[in-house]
Amino acid sequence: MERTYLQTINVFRDISERHYFVKEFLSDAPLKINDTVKKFPAVCIYPTGSKLQQNAINYTLRMFVVDIVQRENKNKDKIISDTEQIIQDFKVELISSASTYGIYIQNTDMPLTKFSETFPSVDNTDDEHIIAGNYIDWNITVIANPKLCNLPIAPYTASTFDLRAI
């Protein structure tokens, strides 16, 4: 099954929407979390690289799973644990349904990175929100096998390319 970048992101969106604990999905840089996300925990995913191969595309997608930290960091350890579990849930789902999704994880030994960030409030107050969670860099491969007859390029003819013009 061939997949485009948007179709690949939509697989992650679909898993997020079906996950019982994820409340929101964002396909954008994590600095947009405070501007966009209204419900937590949230999944934020964006590309950090891609590589074209003969019949496939390799993507590196960074996925953050975050939640709001309560005052005095009362729930920070729970957030770290819960967001780690959500990432593990994604991994199991992607591996067990790889042929259904058309997404293949290249390296199943992927480090998780824990983080905690302070973001200013978007409602023009002096409040700040602290989010915490984990992120992971998914190295995945999707099939990309374009056929010559399906290319959106007119056929080559001798009149379309004149070597003397070069």
Image: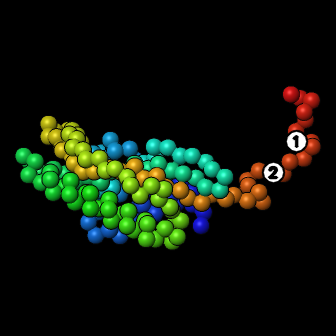
The count of marks equals 2
Quadrant occupied by the C terminus: top right
Picture residue at 41% right of the left edge, 58% below the top: 108
Pinpoint residue 109: horizontal percent, then vertical percent.
38, 55
Q: Quick check: 49 left or right of 22?
A: right
Q: Is residue 37 visible?
A: no
Q: Label 2: few (<14), some or many (≥20) within 10 Å?
A: few
Pinpoint residue 21: horizontal percent, then vertical percent.
26, 66
Quadrant occupied by the N terminus: bottom right
* Colour mode of the rendering: rainbow
Q: Name the residue tied to disc 1.
A: 160
Residue lying furthest top in this view?
166
Asked if residue 12 is positioned above or below residue 161 in the image, the reply reads below
Q: Name the residue tied to disc 2.
A: 154
2 or 1: tag closer to the N-terminus: 2
Q: Nearer the viewer, residue 27 or 132?
A: 132
Pinpoint residue 57: horizontal percent, then vertical percent.
58, 52
Pinpoint residue 129: horizontal percent, then vertical percent.
18, 44
Q: Is residue 43 visible?
A: yes
Is the residue under label 1 in contact with that under label 2 (CB below 8 Å)?
yes
Picture residue at 92% right of the left edge, 42% below the top: 159
Q: Secondary structure at mark 1?
A: helix
The label on residue 115 is: none
Q: Nearer the viewer, residue 160 or 102?
A: 102
CA gap, disc 2 and disc 1 = 10 Å
Picture residue at 12% right of the left edge, 54% below the top: 75
Three-letter residue code for mark 2: Ala
Three-letter residue code for mark 1: Thr
Asked if residue 157 is positioned above or below residue 79 in the image, the reply reads above
Q: Secondary structure at mark 2?
A: loop
Q: Nearer the viewer, residue 65 or 34?
A: 65
